[in-house]
Amino acid sequence: MRVKRRIWATAAVATTAVAGVLVFEGVTGTSDVPDGIGASSGPARTEVHRSALKVAEDGSTASLRQGSTEPFSMLGVTWTDPSAKVTGSVQARTRSASTGKWSAWLPIDTEVDGRTETGRPGTRGTTEPRWVGPSNGVEVRVSAGGGSSAGLPAGLRLDTVDPGKGSGAEPAAYAVDATDEPSADPTDATADPTDAPSAEPTEPADGETTEPATESPSPSASEDPAPSTEPGTSTSPSAPATTPSATTGPTSTLPPPLPSTAPKPAIVTRAQWKADESLNDESPDYMDTVKAVFVHHTAQTNTYNCADSAAIVRGLHAYHVQSNGWKDLGYNFIVDKCGTVFEGRKGGVDRAVMGAHTYGFNRETTGIAVIGMYTDTSAATAATTAVARIAAWKLGQYGVDPAETVKLTAGAAGNNYAGKTFTAGTAYSFGRISGHRDGFNTQCPGTKLYAQLPTIRSYAAGPVTGLVVKSVTGAVLSGTSYHTKADITVGWSATTPAVFVTGYELLVDGKAVASVPGSASSAKATLAAGSHKVQVRATHRSGKTSLSAAATVVADRTAPVFSTKPNLSLRTGTVSTSAVPLTLKWKATDAVQLRDVRLTAPVAKTYGPTTTSASHTAKPAVANTWKMTAYDRAGNGAAASVAGTPVILQETSATKRGSWTTKSSSSYLGGKSLSSSTKGASLTWTFTGRSAAWVVSRASTSGQAQVYVDGVKAATVDLKSSTTKYRQAIWTKSWSASAKHTVKVVVVGTSGRPALTTDGLVYLK
């Protein structure tokens, strides 16, 4: 038999503002609330459809096939006895209302403890609800499992939830990944062969898993004992001191809101997500304090669109009340993967409202659920940041440091995921921010999200982590030091999100020179000349500070110096009508550290800080200015230059003494040369310049010559070479300044090889 219950609320929700002084001003209204949420007035029209499952004769399996249903977007399976369990598996597949395609078989989590407040009528055992998106067909199958002797619990029922849209339209972009539409069950005589789902399983849809999903809230057990006698004392001078009663239990009396040591994040109110308040008209239970936060995951899917988050929250609300039989939504807060925070159980987000989320440990705690399934997938940074913000704000109302541990008294016997056993009335140690699995035997909040809890605690408690100097703009990094000649801009990064950072300070040699808000990632500084240690100090919302490693920055505003100005000289090598060998020399120094020396004309070259000379060539009879700039590590520069023009003096321009023979060849400069084997024969050139080079032809039979400069013998040069070479500058001489000089070469008349051939003289003016 199929039973449908429709709920429609028309009453508006009234809220009462209670004055209070907050350390951080709370966020109210729709600030930072995503577009489309709260855009229309009035609650949403929610519908819960109930259909009994058909149990096999042996009691080991149950199923339901509906080729056509009323619209729904969330489903779950319930049964009569809240203390009973399905030890096997529950799976469902649905037909998309938009595409008509059937999904793969989807696992439905069975780790929920259905026991709620003792004595409440209508309480049922239940699976975790699963969001499947807009659907109009469903198939469910339940198995008791091979190891179960008890079979399936009685009263198995499928509950499907249509979360509605309220009086205004909401976007709905979510859809379950589709597979081919299954064929009709041949054993079902009433099945529609065009749309009935198959009884055979298929591969799961992309992004889903065949492993059981992990976890829904546990109920708020009324057998929870009175709060432990451990007071929630403050660890911060600005935090409010609270001393909860050791004997007083939850109460329906509205307590005043308390200020917090952390800022209140934006929260989508129940009115904004269009809660149907007619579902639960009971007064909330209030506690004296909140000592810890339990983190959960819910709705069993990560592929939802955040535009559907409000609808998912409405679905959870309807399922918890109408299917589980709880007094209200179990969680105090719900967070979607985009970081939007939704108000959960009613009673006031800034009050200590007792929820139904962690069986045995609902008292003195707050439950925060992240929409999604995080067994194999990590939660997005936006979601973990939102969880940390809510936790820091809520715990901060009671002077609690999120990094601490706390003793919580078990309200019921049980055990957790790690196998730890709890005895009712006994106090156990928990992190101030814990996972559901720490207090109950469940995978919730999923292995991946559970592994992110240390990060969430760090975000909430501080100090700022991962703080490093990333860049020093206006400076050049050399090795481990930065060098600058002007003001600098220091950039940094931190792994802690900016929303948890009060501000940053830029320190130079331990003193703050700039302060910027927590949203900033850089600051400017002016440095005096010299070496400095530059650091960044971050202040967390908790007041805790952290310091980056120091960066060494050397401020240098003094340019390098050319201790030896650039100068040119002729060098040995091959001479042609287009290139004369030259040597360019210089020496540059810097008071801090020379970076390089750059030649910019007539050619471009860059030389290291220890290089002081380089070989070049220049075209004869062409005047060039050789321009150089020396740079230090800070970028200061000093320029210097030298000009020079190489000139070729042909052998015919020399004054001859003795016997000389003219030789012709294209290998000679100008096509001609002079040769002599006569001892004492000489050639003399006169010029005005600062460097000279004698050009000859060389061979294995070449002899020797004596070279005189300004009438003084300067060298005896041997022209012999194992290979024949032409236009060779074999001897050079340079002076510090340009002046008039004579160069005379005299044939030695070497025995056995007296001949020499000269191709002229080159000088530099």
Image (cartoon, rainbow, N blue to C red):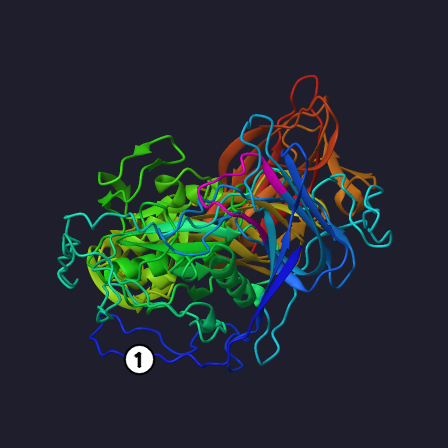
- Residue 621 is left or right of residue 262, and the answer is right
Q: Position of residue 649 (x, y in %)?
A: 66, 50
Residue 474 visible: no
Q: Residue furthest top?
A: 752
Q: Position of residue 402 (x, y in %)?
A: 27, 51
- Residue 554 is left or right of residue 132, and the answer is left
* Image point (19%, 58%), residue name: 399
Q: Is residue 77 magenta?
A: yes
* Image point (57%, 73%), residue name: 45
Determine whether 396 is above or below 750 in the image: below
Mark 1 closeness class: few <14, some 14–19, many ≥20 residues within 10 Å: few
What's the residue type where badge 1 is placed? Thr
Q: Is residue 483 magenta?
A: no
Determine whether 82 is above or below 545 in the image: above
Q: How many marks?
A: 1
* Image point (25%, 78%), residue name: 18
Residue 538 visible: yes
- Residue 740 is left or right of residue 186, and the answer is left
Q: Hey, which quadrant is residue 409 in on the image? A: top left
Q: Magenta span: helix, strand or loop, mainly?
A: loop
Q: Position of residue 23 (x, y in %)?
A: 21, 70
- Front-most of residues 168 and 729: 168
- Front-most of residues 549 and 87: 87
Span shown in magenta: 76-90
User: Which quadrant is home to the C terminus?
Assistant: bottom right
- Give the labeled residue for mark 1: 16
**Badge 1 element:** loop
Q: Position of residue 100 (x, y in %)?
A: 79, 59
User: Which quadrant is home to the N terminus?
Assistant: bottom right
Determine whether 512 is above or below 713 in the image: below
